[in-house]
Image: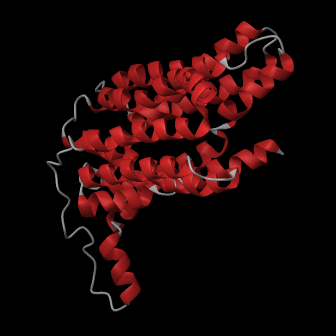
Amino acid sequence: MFYMASPFAGIFVDKMGCRKTAFLGGVVCCVGMIAGSFVPRIEYLYLTYGLVVGTGIGLAYVPSLIILGHYFRRHLGVTSGIVTMGSSVFTAVLPFGLKPALLHLGLPNTFRIMGGLFFLVSLCALSYRQILHRDANHNTTEPCNNRLRAVITKVVNVRIWQNRTYVMWCGGVFVALLTYFVPMVFLVKHSQQVFPKADAHILVTCLGAASGAGRLVFGKISDLPKVGRIRLQQIGLFLMGVSSLLVPLCSVFPALIVMAVCVGLFDGALMATLGPASIDLVGPRDASQALGFTLGLACLPLMAGMPIAGV
C-alpha cells in the first residue's frame, strides 16, 4: 500500500503542496496504528495496519523527498541520503525497543506508542515550505472532447510520460525490483536453517545499518559532477544482486554477515538516488508525480516477486 499510494501522493503534492500531503500522511498513519490497537482479531490488521498505515506512509514519504528538490541542487544526493537514512536507522534500532514494549506493555499499547511516533511525522511536515510551484499549464495538448480524458489530463501530469528517458527508467526500476525484497525476507530463515546456533536477527540489524551508511556514502558520491545518478543505481543494483548470489555459498556465519552488509550497502545506492534521479530526469517542478508513479509501478513487481520467490 505504501507503493500503491505513492502516485496519489504525487498528485496531492501538486494539488495541495508537500506540507499538507505529508501532514495528512502522518495523521492517517497515526489513526491506523491506534485503530489497530483495538481490533479483536488479527485479520482486522490487514485493514488498519496494512491498508490505512500503508497509505499514510505513501502520503508522507513522497513529499519528504520532493521537498528537497526545492532547496538543494548541488548537494541533493547527500541530503536525500540523510533523509532516507532515517528508515535504516529505525530498522536497526526500533526492534530493540519494540521487543521489551511488547513483553511488558502488550501489543495494543505498543501500537499506540507507534501511533504517537507516526504523529511526529505530521509535526515535522509543518516545516515543509514549498518554494517552487508547478506550471498550471503542464498538459499543453490540443483541445479534448473526451470528458474522462480531460479529467485525467487535468489531474495527471502527462508531460512526464512524454519523456522517453523517464519511461525507460521506470521500466528498468520495474524489472529490477522484482527480487528486491528477497534478501530482506529470506535471509533470517536461511540463516536459521544453515546456522541454527547463531543469532540470525543480527543480520537484519547489520543490513539496516549498512543500508544507512550506503545511503550517505552513495548520496555523497552521486553529487560529484562526473557521476551519473542512474549509472550509480545500475552499479548498486548489480552488486546487490551479486551479493545475494553469494549468500548460499557462505559456509560460516561471519561470511553471511559480510554478505548482509554488502546487500545493505549497495541497497543504499538505490535508495539514496531514487528521488534525486527523478528530479534530474523531469525537473523539480514535475518530480512529485514522476517519483510517485515510479513507486506506484514498483508495487507490482514487489508484490509479485515474493510469492514467486516463496514457491
Q: Which quadrant holds the C terminus?
A: top right
Asked which quadrant contains residue 293, the reply is bottom left
Residue at the farthest left position: 131
Residue 179 picture location, percent across and down: 67, 41
Residue 302 visible from this viewpoint: yes
Tell which of 30 and 64 is nearer to you: 30
Taking 179 as reference, is 245 above or below it? above
Please, which colouring scheme is shown?
secondary structure
**Identity of the residue drawn at 30% across and 29% down:** 79
Q: How many marks?
A: 0
**Identity of the residue drawn at 67% across and 13% down:** 257
Residue 185 picture location, percent across and down: 69, 34
Q: Which quadrant holds the N terminus?
A: bottom right
Tell which of 204 and 297 is nearer to you: 204
**Identity of the residue drawn at 48% across and 34% down:** 270
Tell which of 7 and 25 is nearer to you: 25
Residue 193 picture location, percent across and down: 85, 22
In the image: residue 71, left or right of residue 272: left
Taking 207 as reference, is 310 above or below it? below
In the image: residue 256, left or right of residue 123: right
